[in-house]
């Protein structure tokens, strides 16, 4: 690899003005992510403004053995986009590649640059009377390229699927700088291997996503949100099965919110009020949506009645206006802020068969409660997808070292239980660096060989996002 000075001299002509950041102060914001983790100082930050510039920079890195890592909106939760501490890396930020290329409301598709912020794409779709349904707490900052790279999920997966189901076509700069142009707008295409799927969820280890064609849906004319109080997780699952049927498959979100999370939300956003009179152990935050004339109020009221009769819920509130609905969903956002405000904690993102969630929840709560009685468990999530964020706030007054060690031990035990239930240690956040050891422990030999083989085929020099998902030695 050439000296840093030589690399900077060589890269500058490949980019236009403002395309290369080299001072420590200016690079500061590219070292930090949403949870507050800090990466090392990168070699530089390249900010290409066109796909060709991305290809030129990546091609240069390939020819001169320069490791690089793509970066989107820094909202990833597993440290994948942070520059490495051991080997200096070039950060390749997609933030300037941010145009909507085309929107086709008859084909129900939108073609975008990878650096478009998710909210911008949702707004553009809405202007064309369409909906791009990916919805997550970070949608004001995360980028489409990051969503593709992490196969993002979010609130509406149970109706529309994850990013993998929402991508019709992709444009990717391969690790040697060649361009894979798969920007097809087809809803059906069975011609050979589906190459785009390789790059979805690959966390930037197989190529740099520069563009995507996304699937759109008719825009919802009516939506209704409700908060329902339930006695326990078992009842929440019974209610979920009921709601899927009673709501004519119009259910768009079904979130488990334990009491501890509601309290964290009230703590983080003092303007919020507890929407119900009496506290309940768990709640469901749900939404139904329809693009045509359907009586959603009658549908939810009928669900209330059936749920009450079956002892699956004890109370509930149906938002009577858009403002009230927004306040209910603010609870979901504020509880994340509340967790972040508590400092270091264990953040997990596990997947279980939906029907096993209650048994898993009970077993995991008992195990963690025995190991650390003063820790606070906050297990919430996209329960309609079998995705639980089984998070743990450590006991107060631990030294930072003891806190980290305790959380690590608790995570190991939790993941063992996930494995006993045939679940996954990552439902949507991915592996990055933080989950790598647990991920590798659980890979079978054929799985490892296939993954290693793919990585080697596409990136034989191991320069792209080294050490994410697979160990850096897998060159
Ligand atoms: C408050 C909050 C709520 C969240 N809720 C959810 C949720 O409900 N569901 C969910 O799935 N996730 C959720 N996340 C996680 C996060 O928002 C997603 O992982 C998101 O898709 C990351 O996008 P990003 O642009 O911020 O990517 P970054 O954080 O910048 O990068 C993430 C990974 O993708 C790679 N990458 C980025 N851009 C590209 C590209 N163009 N080409 C190739 N690789 C690239 C990076 O190298 C890194 O490995 C949440 C995060 C926060 C902070």
Image (spheres, helix red, strand yellow):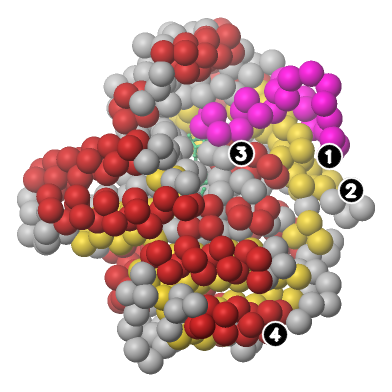
- Look at the image and tell me whether residue 335 can be seen: no
The residue at the point 45 percent across, 79 percent down is 311
Of residues 391 and 65, which is closer to you in this image? Answer: 391
Dot 1: element: loop
Mark 4 surroundings: few (<14), some (14-19) or many (≥20) residues within 10 A: few
The residue at the point 61 percent across, 33 percent down is 200
Sooner in the amino-acid sequence: mark 2 or mark 1: 2
Residue 107, label in figure: 2
Q: Nearer the viewer, mark 3 or mark 1?
A: 1
Q: Is residue 369 left or right of residue 380?
A: left
Q: Quadrant of the C terminus?
A: top left
Q: CA distance from mark 2 to mark 1?
A: 9 Å
Q: Against 69, is 143 above or below?
A: below
Residue tagged 3? 148
The reply to whether the residue tagged 3 has its Cβ within 8 angstroms of ligand 1 is yes
Q: CA distance from mark 3 to mark 1?
A: 17 Å
Q: CA distance from mark 3 to mark 2?
A: 21 Å
Residue 187, label in figure: 1
Sooner in the amino-acid sequence: mark 3 or mark 1: 3
Sooner in the amino-acid sequence: mark 2 or mark 4: 2
Q: Is residue 149 left or right of residue 406?
A: right
Dot 4: element: helix
The reply to whether the residue tagged 2 has its Cβ within 8 angstroms of ligand 1 is no
The residue at the point 44 percent across, 16 percent down is 448
Specify the farthest residue to the front: 310
Q: Which residues are magenta?
A: 179-204
Mark 1 surroundings: few (<14), some (14-19) or many (≥20) residues within 10 A: few
Residue 298, label in figure: 4
The residue at the point 22 percent across, 41 percent down is 413
Dot 2: element: loop
User: Could you tell me what secondary structure mostly forms the magenta stretch?
Assistant: loop
Dot 3: element: helix
């Amino acid at each position: 690899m050439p000296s840093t000075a030589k690399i900077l001299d060589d890269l500058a002509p490949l980019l236009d003005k403002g395309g290369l950041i080299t001072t420590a102060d200016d690079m500061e914001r590219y070292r930090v992510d949403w949870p507050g983790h800090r990466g090392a100082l990168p070699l530089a930050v390249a900010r290409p403004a066109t796909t060709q510039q991305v290809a030129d920079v990546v091609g240069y890195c390939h020819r001169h053995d320069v490791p690089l890592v793509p970066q989107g909106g820094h909202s990833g939760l597993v440290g994948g986009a942070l520059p490495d501490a051991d080997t200096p890396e070039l950060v390749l930020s997609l933030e300037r590649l941010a145009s909507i290329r085309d929107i086709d409301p008859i084909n129900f598709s939108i073609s975008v640059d990878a650096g478009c912020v998710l909210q911008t794409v949702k707004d553009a779709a809405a202007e064309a009377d369409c909906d791009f349904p990916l919805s997550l707490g970070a949608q004001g900052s995360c980028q489409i390229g990051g969503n593709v790279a992490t196969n993002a999920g979010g609130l509406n997966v149970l109706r529309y699927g994850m990013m993998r189901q929402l991508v019709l076509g992709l444009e990717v700069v391969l690790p040697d700088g060649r361009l894979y142009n798969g920007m097809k707008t087809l809803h059906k295409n069975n011609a050979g291997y589906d190459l785009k799927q390789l790059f979805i969820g690959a966390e930037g280890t197989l190529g740099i996503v520069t563009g995507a064609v996304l699937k759109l849906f008719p825009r919802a004319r009516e939506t209704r949100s409700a908060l329902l109080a339930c006695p326990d997780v078992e009842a929440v699952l019974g209610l979920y099965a009921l709601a899927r049927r009673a709501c004519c498959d119009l259910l768009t979100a079904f979130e488990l919110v334990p009491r501890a999370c509601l309290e964290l939300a009230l703590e983080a956003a003092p303007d919020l009020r507890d929407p119900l009179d009496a506290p309940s152990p768990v709640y469901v935050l749900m939404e139904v949506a329809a693009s045509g004339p359907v009586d959603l109020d009658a549908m939810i009221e009928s669900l209330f009645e059936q749920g009450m009769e079956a002892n699956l819920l004890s109370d509930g509130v149906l938002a009577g206006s858009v403002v009230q609905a927004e306040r209910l969903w603010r609870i979901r956002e504020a509880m994340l802020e509340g967790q972040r405000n508590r400092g270091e904690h264990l953040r997990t993102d596990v997947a279980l068969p939906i029907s096993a969630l209650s048994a898993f929840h009970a077993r995991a709560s008992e195990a963690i409660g025995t190991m650390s009685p003063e820790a606070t468990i906050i297990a919430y999530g996209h329960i309609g997808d079998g995705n639980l964020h089984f998070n743990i706030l450590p006991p107060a007054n631990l030294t930072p070292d003891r806190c980290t060690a305790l959380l690590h031990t608790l995570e190991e035990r939790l993941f063992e239980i996930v494995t006993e239930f045939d679940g996954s240690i990552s439902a949507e956040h991915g592996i990055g660096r933080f989950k790598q050891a647990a991920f590798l422990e659980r890979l079978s030999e054929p799985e490892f060989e296939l993954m290693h083989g793919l990585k080697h085929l596409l990136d034989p020099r191991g320069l792209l996002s080294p050490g994410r998902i697979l160990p850096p030695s897998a060159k």
